[in-house]
Amino acid sequence: MEAGAWIQPQHASYAGMRDAWLRVEELGADTLFNWDYLAPGFNGPDYDLSPLADLISWRDERRKRDAEAAG
């Protein structure tokens, strides 16, 4: 069985989201989702390109951690 998690980026700090995805990974989730569209999910127009930046940052952080683990 596989398990995944979804982290909602709107109204969240990057640091908070990073902590959440690290915790999700520690719990053994196979996938982590974030919305990938560039419009507000809800509650107003206070949105920018941060979901895209978050996804790229998560990818880069994971690559760095994988490289460190490989030695």
Image (tube, grey):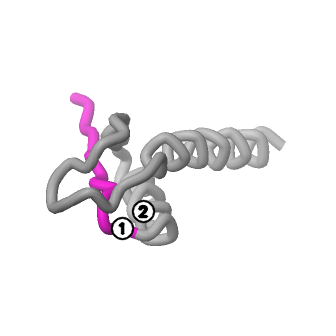
Magenta segment's dominant SS is: loop
* Residue positioned 68% across, 39% down in the render: 63
- Label of residue 12 in the image: 1
Residue 48: image location, x then y, percent: 43, 51
* Residue positioned 49% across, 40% down in the render: 52
Residue 2: image location, x then y, percent: 26, 31
Question: Which residue is nearer to you in this view: 56 or 11?
Answer: 11
Q: Which is more N-terminal, label 1 or label 2?
A: 1
* Residue positioned 31% across, 67% down in the render: 11
Question: Which residue is nearer to you in this view: 56 or 71?
Answer: 56
Q: Is residue 33 visible?
A: no
Identify the magenta region.
1-12
> With 30 as the anchor, is 45 left or right in this view?
left
- Mark 1 belongs to which amino acid? Ala
> With 64 as the anchor, is 48 left or right in this view?
left
- Badge 1 local density, few (<14 within 10 Å), some, or many (20+)? few
- Label of residue 23 in the image: none
Task: Calculate the distance from the C-alpha at mark 2 to the C-alpha at mark 1.
Answer: 7 Å
